[in-house]
Image (cartoon, rainbow, N blue to C red):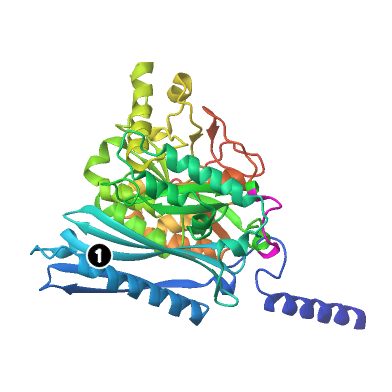
Amino acid sequence: MKQIRRALLLAVCLLTALSILSPAQAGGKLSALPAALQAAVLSEERYEGDKTQYIYKEYLQTAHPKVDADIRQTVDGLDKAYSPLLIPQAQSRAKLYNRLDIEVNYFRTGDSWLSTLIIARNTHKKQQKDIAIVSRLYDMNTGDIVSLEGIFPADSAAWPLMLDRVSAHLDGLFPALERDSGAIAALQTMESLRQAAFTLSGMELTLHYPLAPLFPGKTGLTHVRFFYPEFAGMMSPEAEKQTDNSRWKMVALTFDDGPRGESTEKTLNALRQSGMRGTMFTVGRLYEDNMTRLHREYDANHLIANHSWNHWNGHGLEPPARLKQVQKVQDFLLETLGEAPRYFRAPGGTYPPWIEVGTGLPLIQWSVDTYDFRGRSAQVILTNIQKNIREGDIILMHDTGDILNTAVAGIGEFLWNSGYMPVTVEELALAQNVETKPDTVYFRFYQGDYSERRDSNTN
């Protein structure tokens, strides 16, 4: 009996010890969000100029007051610099037609690094007119800012790798457009690279450059992408630790049928305020009427993907017409954003006609369907995910309805607090060592398994 009691006491002590460890200390996969990475968005709004100008700005409330103070100072500085540039012309309904938005995009990596991309966007008559950015990478244990030089030692082979890609990317952008060659050349130097705006996310280091100084008449950002496996052996020890997200259970949130109206805007707001990246499977015929929304998706570093030009399921179309449905989207986005989609989703999930014709892109299906298009409530959508989610899943949603966007915040809270990291489809494949191939169908990414698995909740 004494031995049993002693064993029970030992077990209780062990469980108690484990319970006080942070998720990052306990070993194995994370089951909760590390305390250092807690974050919430606070917002303020005001009118100026006899209510002809509207200013909206965001701050972060994090686990470190030093970080909060730096973000507040940065946001207020952007407000002071750019709110006077709002067009003074009298305009009713300024919230729609004459506004400055200062939004804080943030991304987590490792157990204590928080990456931010603060975007100040001037919108007039629903058209994006100007954009400014400030990026920061914070060590949330100390509150200190981590620079690119804090990630890569001075003699790291990463520097020439990055500079070569930046140069090739900028030289290849918008070949038919007028360009400021001097401004582009100034960014193709090692000194400029060391000062470049950047963010870290689940599997990606992204450099961000405003387009307006490089291409007159262009607004928005261009992104130069690098993935952590490319930097094997090139990072500092702490950076290697903080970019190893193998303890997170990664999943991909995907959104179909946009960009479309306020529903897309609300979805983007919810994703940003939850610190999540998504993959947006977009429909080409909607671009013209939703150009600012398309730019918002791309600037915030969501992955823009191809969902055909007319949302055609492929049946009844001759092969040339099917290919045109895909290629029109590729051409438009390359010309507009400077980056063509790398993934395709068949409208309605009817992938056989697209495999038959050969799109040249990987075809992304899903393993968990929220059925949000059926008018489900936010709680039912969330419950479906809670019941069915597994590491490596691809979750199907739509950013075009009036309900889904209300569920995104709850989805984000559940995922983060359960040890899941929402990433793009591209990041998820990389994390699971899956090399995606053209005209191959993927339902999920987990340890090489990308076979079909559908959730059981179909009510």
Q: Which residue is mark 1?
A: 100
Question: What secondary structure is the magenta-colored segment mainly?
Answer: loop
For the N terminus, the image quarter is bottom right
Look at the picture and state if 455 lies above or below 269. above
* Residue 377 drawn at (x, y percent): 35, 57
Amino acid, disc 1: Leu
* Residue 323 drawn at (x, y percent): 38, 22
As helix, strand or loop, the secondary structure at mark 1 comes to strand
Look at the picture and state if 325 lies above or below 365. above
Could you say which quadrant of the image residue 56 lies in?
bottom left
Of residues 358 and 219, the one nearer the viewer is 219
As drawn, the residue found furthest toward the front would be 182
* Residue 228 drawn at (x, y percent): 61, 51
Could you say which quadrant of the image residue 148 lies in?
bottom right
* Residue 192 drawn at (x, y percent): 49, 56
Look at the picture and state if 307 lies above or below 70. above
Magenta range is 231-238
